[in-house]
Amino acid sequence: MIYQARAPDYAITQKVSQQLCNRGVRQPCQIKVVTSEGNVTLSGTIQYGHQRRMVLQTTRAVDGV
């Protein structure tokens, strides 16, 4: 069995936040990212309904999530 080290939670949170910002999720959108043991919880508000899917896809694409 090969053991692969998991990214620290703070690094995952930082990466998800950066990727969301890169995808244009900024003010007035307010997304809070919390990571615990590799599980990411998103909360907050988005401006348009179509952004929800993009936020979820972007978050799931980050290594360690």
Image (tube, grey):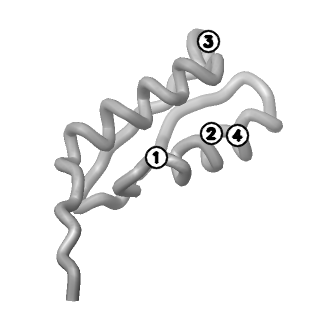
The Cα atoms of the two marked residues, 2 and 3, are separated by: 15 Å
User: Marks 1 and 3: which is nearer the front?
Assistant: 1
Q: Which residue is label 2 attached to? A: 55
Residue 22 - label: none
64 in relation to 3, above or below: above
Q: Which residue is label 1 attached to? A: 62
Task: Return the x and y of residue 8 as percentages of the image width and height.
Answer: 18, 48
User: Marks 4 and 3: which is nearer the front?
Assistant: 4
Q: Residues within 10 Å of mark 1 (few under 14, many from 20)?
A: few
The Cα atoms of the two marked residues, 1 and 4, are separated by: 13 Å
Q: Which residue is label 3 attached to? A: 28
User: Marks 2 and 1: which is nearer the front?
Assistant: 1
Amino acid type, callout 4: Met
Q: Quadrant for the N terminus, please.
A: bottom left
Q: Residues within 10 Å of mark 3 (few under 14, many from 20)?
A: few
Dot 2 or dot 1: first in sequence order is 2
Amino acid type, callout 2: Val
Dot 1 or dot 3: first in sequence order is 3
User: Marks 2 and 3: which is nearer the front?
Assistant: 2
Dot 2 or dot 3: first in sequence order is 3
Q: Quadrant for the C terminus, please.
A: bottom left
Q: Which residue is label 4 attached to? A: 54
Amino acid type, callout 3: Pro
The Cα atoms of the two marked residues, 2 and 1, are separated by: 11 Å
Mark 4: which secondary structure?
helix
Q: Residue at 52% of width from left, 34% of height from top?
A: 44
